[in-house]
Amino acid sequence: MRWSRAVVIFVSLLPACAAAPCRSAEFSDWLSFNTPVAGDHLNSIFLFGGRMSTTTFGDTLGFNTASGLQAPFYDNYIVGAAYQRDFYRIGGFVFALEAGIADRFGNYAECCSPVVTTPNILNSGEFWAGPNFRYDGIVFFNALRVTPGWTMGFSATTNSIGAERGNEIAAPGSARFLVYLGPELAFSAVSTPQWELVLRVQHRSGAWHTFGNLGEGYNANEGGVRYHF
């Protein structure tokens, strides 16, 4: 009978379970919230590139996939680097300071009502600095670490191009000195936590017209690599 065969199989497995305890997969086998990075890597360098967004901060967070948005969704490009120094850690929570520099460049002089382009490559330099907060204790399947982070501070630029220039004209206002926000997600292998793949949204804001009489400044979707040392 089938049930008797099942009993025989179950009994035959008991010695194996005694040697290696049988159990169902536990929650901690696939997701852990208390596995901070070990070691003394207090410094990091982040190298990145991306596209400058013509939309708001909220739409840029969604990679401009919301319905009803008007093209073009992106105009110019950005490349840059950021340095971080860790100062305080408690569990998986880390407090650091960040300073960064970037070149925003492309053919869009103004966007997007109207769109004004030029055959020459335009450049706009940016520098920002501020505190960074992150949590590096999230681990999936005991192998993949996911680290949410948030940088906030202030950003200064040499000039405005693309959608940022359009925002200046519409306000009217100035984007030379604005608030900086940089929410991100970083991904790394537990075995090599010093290397991370990073997705970040770079946001310059007038903080409801507090700075430069602007609401939005310029946003960007970025991807890059961070190395901790």
Image: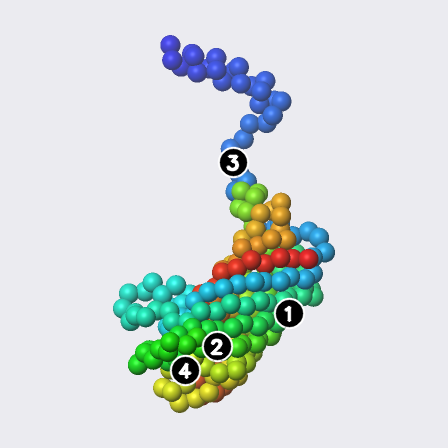
Q: Nearer the viewer, mark 1 or mark 2?
A: 2
Q: Which residue is mark 2?
A: 123
Give the spatial CA distance, label 4 vs label 2.
12 Å
Lateral position of residue 187 relative to residue 74, left or right:
right
Q: Name the residue furthest bottom.
A: 172
Lower position in the chain sequence, tag 4 or tag 3: 3
Q: How is the image coloured?
A: rainbow
Circle 3: element type: loop
Q: Are marks 3 and 1 in contact (CB under 8 Å)?
A: no
Identify which amino acid the numbered label 1 is placed on. Answer: Leu
Q: Which residue is mark 1?
A: 97
Position of residue 13 measured from the top left corner of the image (x, y, whole percent): 53, 18
Q: CA distance from mark 1 to mark 2?
A: 27 Å
Task: Tell me residue 22's x, y (percent).
Answer: 55, 27
According to the picture, the residue beneath numbered tag 3 turns out to be 25
Asked whether residue 181 is in view, the answer is no
Q: Quadrant of the N terminus?
A: top left
Task: Say which of 42 and 8 sits in front.
Answer: 42
Q: Nearer the viewer, mark 1 or mark 4?
A: 4
List x then y, in percent, for residue 217: 44, 79
- What's under tag 3, amino acid-wise? Ala
**Up-down: is 223 above or below 114?**
above
Marks 2 and 3, the one that precedes in the sequence: 3
Can you say whether 126 is above or below 82 in the image? below
Q: Nearer the viewer, mark 3 or mark 1?
A: 1
Quarter occupied by residue 172: bottom left
* Secondary element type, mark 2: strand
Query: Which of the two labelled residues, at mark 3 and mark 1, occupies the earlier sequence position?
Result: 3
Q: What amino acid is labelled 4 in the image?
A: Arg
Which residue of the protein is positioned furthest toward the top in this rendering?
Answer: 1
Query: What's the amino acid at mark 2?
Result: Asn
